[in-house]
Image: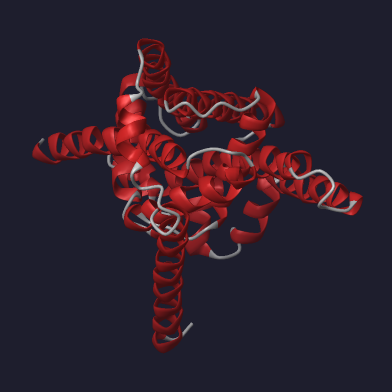
Amino acid sequence: MSFNRRTRIRYLLNFLKIFVFIATLTFIYYKVVKNEHSADLWQSVNNFKNNDLIFLIAAVLLMPLNWILEAVKWRNLLRDLQEIDLITSFKAVWAGLTINNWIPNRMAEFLGRMIFLSKDKRNQSVSCTLTGGMAQFICTVIFGGFSVFFLYSGLFPRSYFFLVVLISLFLLLFYFNLNAFNFITKKIRFFEEYTKVLNFYSIHQLSYILAISAVRYLVYTLQYFLILKVFSVDIPWHAGLTGISVVFLIQALLPSVTLTEIGTRGAAILFVFNRFEILPVNLLLAAYSVWIINIIIPTLFGLLFILRIKSK
């Protein structure tokens, strides 16, 4: 690929991110300010009650559990490459999150994680991180895809259901045959250094990683639902959980970095829950609270971990 072509692709991706950012902020402005809901912000804050505090505490306590599951997952993926303890894995995961927040679509998580490993193991750890990310993405697509069908029942033909099944089966087939992918890449010496660790993954281990990813997904969904309760979003639990899954799916598919997430997270939840009679301000408060608890706070700690290891 020529330099000019790479430059054009980079400019195209940057333009797409800017477009998504502007479009989502415009959507939020139309839903909140244009419809004169901005005054509801202080009312929502003033309506905060003691029972809401219980929901908030529960949601905050689920944050470390969410990331501990990710640390367990990554540690397990590394076991044939390098043994690390759970605390080191936890620090590496948050360090990866810190760097990843500034790269489009969270494509550089491995850069933050690999600095906690031996230098001769870092290249192969890239595949470990990508494997764990793929397992999480599969859960997002499967739960989110079926949630679209159930949340918007009647709007989609029955063929959509079978399309989701086919996509899910394709992703699972690819995931459980990663060693075949390594068979292709090992013919290129540069890629072989990064992908040969895929030969060590058994069906049992990949199933274990997928199961942890599913549990983590459910923890994150429950956390989001609790935050909705904090801001008086009163909807049936099944509608709330399926709606949250659709929000996750939209967020996973839209190109974003930390700045553009301000728009995509808000626009996604407003779009999905638009069919319910809920104050847009309450939805935005919930979306950004989840973002602060799960992303911003761990990012700050991840930065400290990176600075400490660099000082050593």
Q: Is residue 221 above or below residue 15?
A: above
Residue 256 falls in image quadrant: bottom left
* Residue 68 at x, y percent in the picture: 42, 22
* Residue 38 at x, y percent in the picture: 35, 48
Task: Residue at 36% x, 57% y: name it.
Answer: 103
Observer-nearest residue: 45 or 7? 45
Task: Residue at 40% x, 55% y: name it.
Answer: 263
Task: Residue at 25% x, 36% y: name it.
Answer: 302
> How many marks can you see?
0
Answer whether residue 113 is visible to the viewer in this image.
no
Observer-nearest residue: 177 or 171? 171
Q: Is residue 134 above or below residue 54?
A: below
Looking at the image, the residue that sits furthest to the right is 158
Residue 21 falls in image quadrant: bottom left
* Residue 151 at x, y percent in the picture: 73, 40
Query: Which colour style is shown?
Result: secondary structure
Q: Is residue 155 above or below residue 299?
A: below
Observer-nearest residue: 194 or 174? 174
Q: Is residue 177 left or right of residue 127?
A: right
* Residue 182 at x, y percent in the picture: 62, 52
Answer whether residue 291 is visible to the viewer in this image.
yes
Q: Quarter of the image for the C terminus: give it.
A: top left
Task: Residue at 49% x, 41% y: name it.
Answer: 128
Q: Is residue 14 left or right of residue 251?
A: left
